Image (cartoon, rainbow, N blue to C red):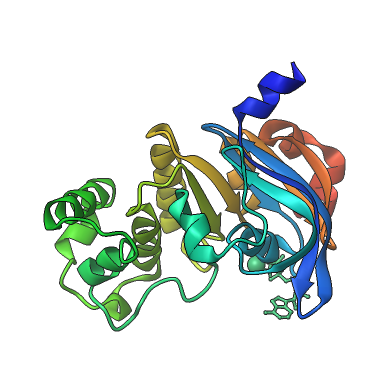
């Protein structure tokens, strides 16, 4: 049983401690994502959600513990090596190149992979199928897009290398309810294409409503974990983390 569960996990983070410049921000985080799951991380500001996402991508010094992706240990490997194993990462901030066009931003998503012109065109066409507004705006500079469209570009760029796992750090931050819903619909659509999702979200109630499972992070530790539905209906979680 334990063995089967293990094989089913695309990502597992095992009791990691780490941070920046020798100061630990993560104080024993453990979490996992099973194949094809949508897993959500919620928690107060500064609790280490973004640091956890960065740690998966080799952007944080991990002092102890391990991170395993598709059965391979990736702890403290170089970022380009880690992403080449097919992890897509959309950071919380500065996730598009403002001075580049939509099309150029998508091309940048495949910059470290030698793709033929044909493959590149095909990959970008697939992104336009998921986000049709981007096709219309492909020649426009990313700085002229709305916040929602910029997030589409950021997600599209991360999808360029056909990731098996997509890491999304607050993809709906600052977006209107309409765009928030649209981005969530797209996340579900991308997941249905076979991509496992690990997503940090401030719009916790909405995110928990479609998450398979979720974790609540507090001060660099995962305090609660359960199915999205159970967390949503828990009085304690509601009072403490979902605004009553
Ligand atoms: N580059 C950095 N150097 C030093 N400390 C950092 C760095 N980035 C973040 N921190 C600190 O690490 C802690 C956790 O930050 P993190 O960004 O992971 O929190 P978060 O849960 O994502 O918060 P938010 O909800 O505001 O996005 C904070 O105290 C923050 O000040
Ligand atoms: Mg953050």
Report whether residue 141 is seen: yes
The correct choice, above or below, for 241 with respect to 37 in the image is below
Residue positioned 29% across, 69% down in the render: 105
Q: Is residue 200 shown left or right of residue 14?
A: left
Whole-percent x, y for residue 7 in the image? 63, 26
| In the image, farthest residue toward the left | 118
Q: How many numbered marks appear? A: 0
Quadrant for ligand 1? bottom right
Q: Horizontal and vertical percent for residue 184?
A: 47, 47
Residue at 48%, 56% (x, y): give it.
83
Reply above or below: 169 against 199: below
Using the image as rendered, state which of residue 211 and residue 89 is in the foreground.
89
Quarter holding residue 217: bottom right
Above/below status of 220 relative to 205: below
Residue 124 picture quarter? bottom left
Q: Is residue 89 visible?
A: no
Q: Nearer the viewer, residue 37 or 75?
A: 75
Residue visible at 76% across and 71% down in the picture: 19
Residue at the image point whose x is 83% and y is 70% from the top: 24
Where the N terminus falls, by quadrant?
A: top right
Side of 173 where 112 appears, left or right: left
- Is residue 13 shown above or below 213? below
In the current view of this chain or complex, which residue is farthest to the top?
A: 1
Q: Residue 174's spot in the image, x, y percent?
A: 52, 69
């Amino acid at each position: 049983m334990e063995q089967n569960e293990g094989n089913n996990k695309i990502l597992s983070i095992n009791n990691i401690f780490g941070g920046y410049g020798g100061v630990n921000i993560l104080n024993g985080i453990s979490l996992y994502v099973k194949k094809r799951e949508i897993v959500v991380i919620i928690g107060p500001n500064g609790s280490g959600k973004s640091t956890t996402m960065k740690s998966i991508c080799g952007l944080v010094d991990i002092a102890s513990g391990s991170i395993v992706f598709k059965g391979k240990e990736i702890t403290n490997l170089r970022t380009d090596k880690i992403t080449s194993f097919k992890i897509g990462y959309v950071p919380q901030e500065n996730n598009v190149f403002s001075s580049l066009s939509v099309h150029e931003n998508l091309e940048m998503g495949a910059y470290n992979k030698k793709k033929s012109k044909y493959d590149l065109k095909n990959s970008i066409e697939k992104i336009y199928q998921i986000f049709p507004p981007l096709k219309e705006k492909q020649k426009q500079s990313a700085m002229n897009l709305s916040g929602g469209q910029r997030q589409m570009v950021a997600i599209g760029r991360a999808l360029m290398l056909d990731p098996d796992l997509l890491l999304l750090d607050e993809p709906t931050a600052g977006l209107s309810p309409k765009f928030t819903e649209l981005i969530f619909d797209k996340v579900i659509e991308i997941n249905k294409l076979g991509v496992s999702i690990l997503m940090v979200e401030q719009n916790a109630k909405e995110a928990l409503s479609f998450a398979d499972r979720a974790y609540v992070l507090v001060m660099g530790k995962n305090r609660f974990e359960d199915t999205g539905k159970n967390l949503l209906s828990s009085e304690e979680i509601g009072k403490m983390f979902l605004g009553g």
